[in-house]
Image (cartoon, grey):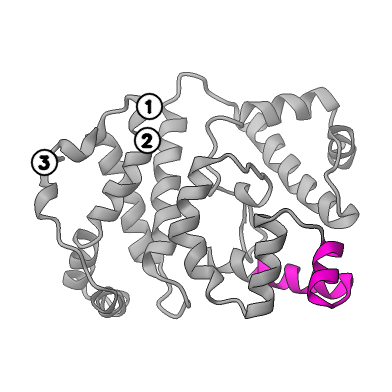
Amino acid sequence: MYYNKVQICGVNTAELKTLSDEEKQELLVKSRGGDENARQKLIYGNLRLVLSVIQRFTGRNENLDDLFQVGCIGLVKAVDNFDVEMNVKFSTYAVPMIIGEIRRYLRDNNAVRISRSVRDTAYRALKAREELIREKEKEPTLDEIAKKLGEPRESVLRAMEAIVDPISLYEPVYSDGGDALYVMDQISDSDSSDEKWLESIALKDVMKTLNDRERKIIQMRFYHNKTQVEIAEEIGISQAQVSRLEKGALDRIRKQI
């Protein structure tokens, strides 16, 4: 395992600096103002974050130096694109960026290549699925998704199966110039170790931005698998109010992640 290795890409992991939240914020502001020295300090001060992420990929027998370098690319992108006005910790923003970069590297180096047309069909199918869920408030069938796309059922099925393994939960699949739609918005898997791990890093911070009622609804809905009707009866409001509050909370969570 990598954590027994002192040198990765010539970096002595035992000597990596850890920045406080105050130091990160100060360096982020300076970096956004064009201070290259602050940018470099910020990158070097967050290399432990990259190390913690690549631990998730050690079971793939990939070269750790390569994963570390790719993860650093994701970290640099996070540093250069982070909005200091966002009410979210830098690590909450950076972790999905680092993971996404590593996942893309693993996907592009996979022996099985997926054509652009198949991937495009899969992405459109994911978007269509989300739209149908919003319209019907239930999981659509494959036939319904295929009909909405105007594609043969078999083509949609093959496309969806083709992206199951390599695509990252945090990879954007659609954007209309506003908030990007991520694969994690489409797929739910209660046994996903990545989701559980990221939850402690990202969702914990985001949940703090919700008010007490919104937080309770999200917890009951997605952690305790209760229906909107059951939640409405328990907290004493209408199902329509629960639906409105849930949608508002999820929209805010998606914007911040």
The tag on residue 6 is: 3
Does the magenta-highlighted stretch encompass residue 240?
Answer: yes
Query: Residue flagged by tag 3: what amino acid is it?
Result: Val
Q: Residues within 10 Å of mark 2 (few under 14, many from 20)?
A: some
In the picture provided, is 115 more to the left or to the right than 233?
A: left
Main secondary-structure element of the magenta-colored stretch:
helix
Determine whether the residue tagged by mark 2 lies in a helix, strand or loop: helix
Report the span colored magenta: 228-251
Which residue, given by chain and number where applicable, does mark 2 sit on? 57
The x, y position of residue 85, in whole percent, is: 45, 80
Q: Considering depth in this image, is 235 or 191 the residue closer to the camera?
A: 235
Query: Residue flagged by tag 2: what amino acid is it?
Result: Phe
In three-dimensional space, the C-alpha distance between marks 3 and 2, rounded to whole angstroms, equals: 18 Å
Observer able to see residue 161: yes
The x, y position of residue 197, in whole percent, is: 45, 49
Q: Residues within 10 Å of mark 1 (few under 14, many from 20)?
A: few
Determine whether the residue tagged by mark 3 lies in a helix, strand or loop: loop
The x, y position of residue 63, in whole percent, is: 26, 29
Residue at horizontal 45%, vertical 39%? Answer: 104
Query: Residue flagged by tag 1: what amino acid is it?
Result: Arg
